Amino acid sequence: AFVRSGLDQGGVSFRLGDAARGRAIYDQAGCGTCHRIGGDGPRLAPDLSDIGAIRRPGQIVTSLTNPGKATMPINRMVTIVTRDGRTIHGRRFNEDTFGVQLIDTQEKIRSIDKADIARYDIGMTSGMPSFTGQLDDNGLADLLAYLVSLKGQ
């Protein structure tokens, strides 16, 4: 059971390249316009500071090549219309029985009571672009190596 718990039966194959080249690809591709690493960058998309510690390499490859399939439900974009008519768009980062917390498109943290919500739409697609066809196998391996190296503090 211990050995099987670390294996991803539905996983994808991957190859790790050069992390330094991967960092350059991260910068050139503009990933830092949405993602944050080590306190630098916006909060529009999930923080990647510890992505190498919390996600397996195969999961990261899926995020890079098929983002809609890999987006965690809590990170999906939402549109909320409140009972008083305000429309709020943002990335959900916490939700419980009574409220939802999100980061809106201006990077402001919003906490909304569910009793105040008239309509609540959860996006089923990812705002992240796919790197399929954008990077060759070596570029993808380099970017993966960089992301896997991010283990946080």
Image (cartoon, rainbow, N blue to C red):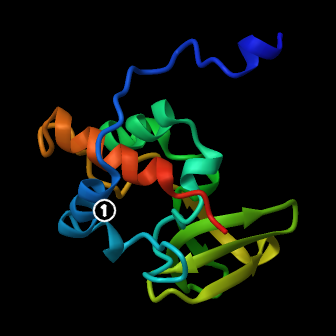
Task: Give how far across and how far down residue 27 sits, in percent.
Answer: 25, 69
As drawn, which residue projects farthest toward the right? 97
Q: Which residue is found at the position 83% from the left and 10% from the top?
A: 1
Could you say which is closer to the camera, residue 45 or residue 117?
Answer: 45
Task: Kindly indicate the quadrant of the structure image that contains residue 68.
Answer: top left
- Is residue 82 shown left or right of residue 97? left
Q: Which residue is mark 1?
A: 23
Q: Which residue is found at the position 39% from the left and 36% from the top?
A: 61
Query: Is residue 123 visible in this depiction of the protein?
Result: no
Task: Give how far across and how far down residue 86 sits, in percent.
Answer: 55, 86
Task: Kindly indicate the quadrant of the structure image that contains residue 131.
Answer: top left
- Is residue 76 shown left or right of residue 113? left
Could you say which is closer to the camera, residue 16 or residue 97?
Answer: 16
Quadrant including the C terminus? bottom right
In this view, 22 is above or below 111: above
Could you say which is closer to the camera, residue 71 or residue 96?
Answer: 71
Q: Amino acid at mark 1?
A: Arg
Task: Kindly indicate the quadrant of the structure image that contains residue 145.
Answer: top left
Could you classify mark 1 by the number of other residues whose Cα lies within 10 Å: few (under 14), some (14-19), or many (20 or more)?
some
Task: Give how far across and how far down residue 94 sits, in percent.
Answer: 73, 65
